Image (cartoon, helix red, strand yellow):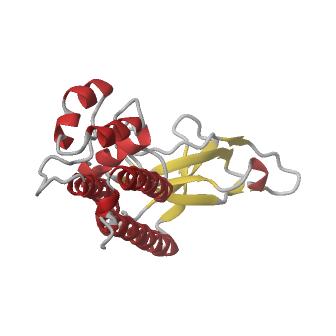
Amino acid sequence: MADPFESSKLKIARAREHVQDLERRISGFVKNNPYKSVVEADSKSIDKIIHKIKFVKSLPPILTVVVGEAANSLREALDNAGYAVAVASGRIKPRHCAFPFAGSLTEFETNALGRCKDIPQEIVALFARFKPYKGGNDLLWALNGICVANKHKMLVPCAIAGAKAEAIRLFTAVGEPFYYQWIPWGWNRAKKEVVFAVTNSKTKVECDITFFVAFDEIEIVGGKPAISILNELIGEVEGIILAIEAETRCRFPAAF
């Protein structure tokens, strides 16, 4: 007999492939040196200069497509699991078996559960334990946010310090004083840059950085590495599917 949850498992496998594709594409983007070191005069002091890392290339639009495909595969895996449960319980062509994402606990209790009324109450109770709403399982709730996000505001390049302060090397003429102020790393989203030091003109600064692609204006996951978040979501969704399958096997063994 065919596995009722095969479709969900294939969707999860497909999401993994999308994340691997995303990793390859980001790696290729980084190898093309999308950022450069910039030195600018400090408008507040003629004796000081500002050192920054600035991105000069835009993220390839295909990256947002790949992220969207990965997220949608995971959401579809959950919806397909709901359909599998409804069919296993004896429903013929069930129509109301979507996974009940919601914006809050109140919305979950008043509206979302209506979207899965073709699913047995015992399984709906299991869905409730996953807390797929904001304020419950925020990571799971964010999955739905990624799926519906404005694709033009989904991703942003980020740079962070790749090492401790001691990895920043200072050079100045022998015997000449230098001024150096290390600046806490903070990504300027609007300018796509990060200032890391202020010095005088006699000082040369080198800094190692780490580059990653983060979610942009998506609540809960904004500013966090897209690949890490997607991998966390894969694990989360896979665990939910396994739990739903186990409960379904227990209550409707004839379907397997």
Q: Residue at x 34, y 41 (%)?
A: 127
Q: Is residue 157 above or below residue 181?
A: below
Q: Within the image, what quadrant is residue 83 found in?
A: bottom left
**What x and y, as percent, mark residue 135?**
40, 29
Residue at image x 83%, y 50%?
Answer: 176
Q: Is residue 143 left or right of residue 36?
A: left
The reply, left or right, for residue 132 in relation to residue 29 is left
> Which quarter of the rendering shows the N terminus?
bottom left
Residue 107 against residue 11 in the figure, above or below:
above
Quadrant location, the C terminus: bottom left
Residue at figure coordinates x 70%, y 57% from the top left = 204
- Furthest residue to the front? 254
Residue drawn at 25 percent across, 57 percent down: 88
Left or right: 10, with 16 as reference point: left
Left or right of residue 67: residue 92: left
Compared to residue 252, the image places residue 7 above or below, namely below
Foreground residue, 40 or 26? 26
Viewer-proximal residue among 252 and 154 = 252
Work out which residue is located at the far top of the displayed protein and give it.
106
User: In the image, residue 155 lies at what x, y percent?
Assistant: 37, 54
Which residue is outermost to the right?
Answer: 175
**Residue 149: image location, x then y, percent:** 26, 48
- Closer to us: 46 or 196: 196
